[in-house]
Amino acid sequence: MSVTEKDVAYIAELARLRFTDAEKKKMTSELNAILHYVEKLNEVDTQGIEPLSSIHDQVNVLREDHCRESMSNDVALKNAPDKLDRFFRVPKVIG
């Protein structure tokens, strides 16, 4: 499979890009080089290789979730510098 300048012009139109003729030629050769590399990867024998979602074998170690009582408003607001009723009071940040 190879990319032509006509293909590059079509892709550029879809992406709303403008290329000069020199840029189209350069883009054509670069895209063809990328496709050639991908074709090389298809030659690799992957028989018996499991698909990976990551290159690492590491597994996240997460703690168990435990249900417990929620903190009361009085306890949550005990150290608040400013409060209004049962809410934290903070400076206005939207003008």
Image (cartoon, grey):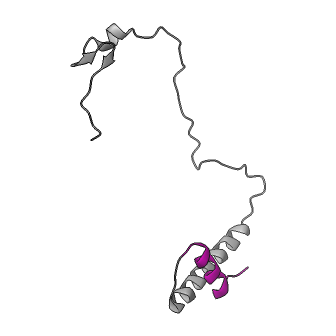
Please report the bounds of the magenta region as a residue range: 1-16
Question: Which quadrant does the N terminus fall into?
Answer: bottom right
| Residue at the image position 24 percent from the left and 14 percent from the top | 79
Residue 80 makes an appearance in the image: no
| Residue at the image position 57 percent from the left and 46 percent from the top | 56
Q: Is 44 above or below relative to 78?
A: below
**Toward the viewer: 1 or 93?**
93
Q: Quadrant of residue 46?
A: bottom right
Pinpoint residue 8: horizontal percent, then vertical percent.
Answer: 62, 81
Q: Quadrant of residue 29?
A: bottom right
Q: Is 61 above or below relative to 74?
A: below
For this orientation, the residue located farthest to the bottom is 21
**Toward the viewer: 82 or 34?**
82
Pinpoint residue 5: horizontal percent, then vertical percent.
Answer: 63, 87
For this orientation, the residue located farthest to the front is 95
Q: Is 84 above or below relative to 25?
A: above
| Residue at the image position 26 percent from the left and 33 percent from the top | 92
**Residue 65 forms part of the magenta stretch:** no
**Toward the viewer: 64 or 94?**
94
Q: Give the prevailing secondary structure in the magenta stretch.
A: helix
Pinpoint residue 11: horizontal percent, then vertical percent.
Answer: 62, 76
| Residue at the image position 70 percent from the left and 82 percent from the top | 2
For this orientation, the residue located farthest to the left is 81
Horizontal placement of 17 versus 75: left or right?
Answer: right
Pinpoint residue 94: horizontal percent, then vertical percent.
Answer: 29, 39
**Residue 13 forms part of the magenta stretch:** yes
Horizontal placement of 35 versus 82: left or right?
Answer: right
For this orientation, the residue located farthest to the right is 47
Q: Is 10 above or below relative to 56?
A: below
